[in-house]
């Protein structure tokens, strides 16, 4: 399936006509009634996070998509999906140059059909390597790495919100790089991977992802911080840092996580909590982690590493938000309440680096019984790509002053300038849910 496809011309024309009518109504409306949806507490993790423009995601394991109890919870609660294993090197390129996307496609299709965005995990990793890759070294391995990035990113171009370009490249306990076959090709392998990734899909955010980098005092945290700082100073394309946040006895949560998030964000990257699970799932710890993200404007989303405890890679730790019966645990309520306590507002500010930053801001337009319009204003760039994701069961029915494509479900739209400037609009059929969509903006090359 190819979700973000340009629509047939007559359909687009009809949409434009509808959009023009909507725009006219907007212009004639004397007073735009403020939308109050952001003041309504969310009843799911995704809608609660969306109140402050954030996402709430989960790892999805493709082997469980046939389990209705699993898909019911995942479909209802989360608006971002990370394939747990299906995009890893061994899954996507089991033989050199022969890409296999069957399992990952199943998850991406499920996500898009259910109005969810996708984090890609992961392009380059010391672990989960197919045999053929493990036997390579030097320039052959470098080339294989770049070819892999190109092959996978081309397949998913335009459909991935953020890619974990490089995962877990630093050693535990020190600020040094982890030894790996990639590392042995030379220190610059990480920036080579990021540059290749930027060229392969300029609309995807590019993240470095790691564990044990949540505690600001840890040497590993400082090592990764120094690398990101150096990348930003030298213009290596990096947009985000993922903090896995697998908290347990040996790597406990510490309140200085907030300092870590703040300090990384101050370098000019978004920060995301990418694989959250906490041994025993204490409600207070979960609430504290959510609070840390909410306190940092550039912390734009949280992903938990699985749906129910038995789905977890460390199920005996019962580290997740739902128990084996699919019931909400106290940690779930703590997370929901913490998300709902956030100050409603637009999306957290995106990349501020010169030349590559933009912000998309939503404001209320006209309202009808069955639909409403939003005005979108883009600042910071005249050449942008805005991704808009609608909460279930809302659908995009029209746009104006913008060149837009969307998935067949009409829940995820990619918009680019059409020569009418940086203010444009969208009309949404709300089907009973008036929660505003989330938007993200990327400056195009
Ligand atoms: O949860 C994943 C588990 O099912 C796999 O067997 C394992 C090895 O590929 O990876 C687990 O996910 C890891 C993630 O990809 C990277 N960060 C650590 C996660 C937990 O081990």
Image (cartoon, grey):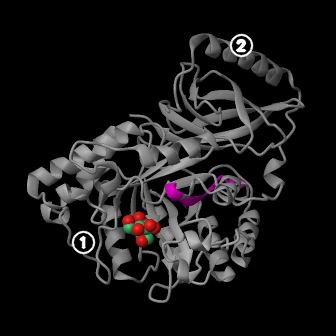
Q: Give the residue drawn at x 59%, y 80%.
A: 318
Query: Looking at this view, is 378 or 42 the one in front?
Result: 42
Region of the chain picked out in magenta, as a range: 50-63
Q: CB of mark 2 within 8 Å of CB of mark 1?
A: no
Q: Is residue 109 above or below residue 313?
A: above
Where residue 6 sits in the image (x, y, percent)?
53, 22
Q: Give the residue drawn at x 19%, y 61%.
A: 182
Q: Give the residue drawn at x 24%, y 72%.
A: 177
Q: Which mark is residue 17?
A: 2
Q: Is residue 193 above or below residue 360?
A: below
Q: Is residue 121 visible?
A: yes
Quadrant in which residue 359 is drawn? top right
Where residue 390 sits in the image (x, y, percent)?
68, 41
Given the current orientation, which residue lies at the most extreme bottom position? Answer: 249
Query: Looking at this view, is 53 or 361 the one in front?
Result: 53
Q: Which mark is residue 177?
A: 1
Q: How many marks?
A: 2
């Amino acid at each position: 399936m190819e979700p973000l496809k340009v629509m047939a011309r007559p359909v687009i024309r009809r949409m434009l006509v509808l959009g023009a009518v909507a725009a006219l109504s907007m212009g004639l409306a004397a007073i735009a009634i403020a939308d109050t949806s952001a003041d309504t507490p969310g009843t799911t993790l995704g809608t609660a996070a969306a109140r402050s423009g954030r996402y709430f995601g989960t790892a999805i394991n493709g082997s469980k998509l046939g389990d209705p109890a699993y898909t019911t919870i995942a479909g209802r609660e989360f608006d971002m999906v990370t394939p747990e294993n299906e995009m890893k090197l061994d899954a996507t390129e089991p033989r050199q140059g022969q890409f296999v996307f069957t399992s990952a496609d199943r998850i991406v299709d499920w996500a898009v059909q259910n109005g969810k965005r996708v984090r890609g995990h992961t392009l380059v990793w010391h672990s989960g390597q197919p045999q053929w890759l493990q036997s390579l070294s030097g320039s052959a391995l470098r080339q294989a790495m770049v070819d892999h990035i190109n092959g996978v990113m081309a397949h998913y171009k335009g459909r991935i919100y953020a890619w974990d370009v490089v995962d877990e490249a630093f050693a535990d306990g020190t600020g040094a790089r982890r030894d790996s076959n990639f590392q042995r090709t030379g220190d610059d392998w990480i920036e080579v991977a990021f540059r290749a990734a930027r060229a392969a899909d300029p609309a995807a955010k590019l993240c470095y992802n790691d564990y044990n980098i949540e505690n600001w005092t840890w040497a590993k945290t400082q090592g990764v911080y120094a690398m990101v700082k150096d990348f930003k100073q030298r213009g290596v394309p990096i947009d985000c840092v993922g903090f896995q946040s697998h908290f347990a006895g040996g790597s406990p949560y510490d309140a200085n996580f907030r300092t870590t998030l703040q300090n990384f964000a101050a370098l000019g990257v978004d920060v995301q909590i990418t694989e959250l699970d906490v041994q025993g799932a204490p409600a207070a710890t979960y609430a504290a982690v959510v609070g840390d993200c909410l306190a940092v404007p550039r912390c734009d989303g949280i992903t938990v590493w699985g749906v129910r405890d038995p789905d977890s890679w460390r199920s005996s730790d019962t580290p997740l938000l739902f128990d084996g019966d699919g019931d909400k645990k106290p940690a779930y309520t703590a997370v929901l309440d913490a998300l709902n306590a956030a100050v409603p507002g637009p999306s957290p500010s995106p990349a501020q680096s010169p030349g590559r930053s933009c912000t998309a801001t939503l404001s209320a337009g006209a309202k009808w019984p069955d639909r409403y319009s939003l005005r979108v204003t883009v600042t910071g760039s005249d050449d942008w790509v805005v991704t808009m994701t609608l909460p279930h069961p809302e659908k995009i029915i029209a746009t104006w002053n913008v060149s837009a494509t969307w998935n067949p479900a009409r829940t995820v739209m990619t918009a680019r300038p059409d020569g009418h400037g940086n203010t444009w609009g969208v009309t949404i059929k709300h089907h009973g849910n008036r929660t505003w969509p989330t938007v993200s903006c990327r400056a195009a090359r």
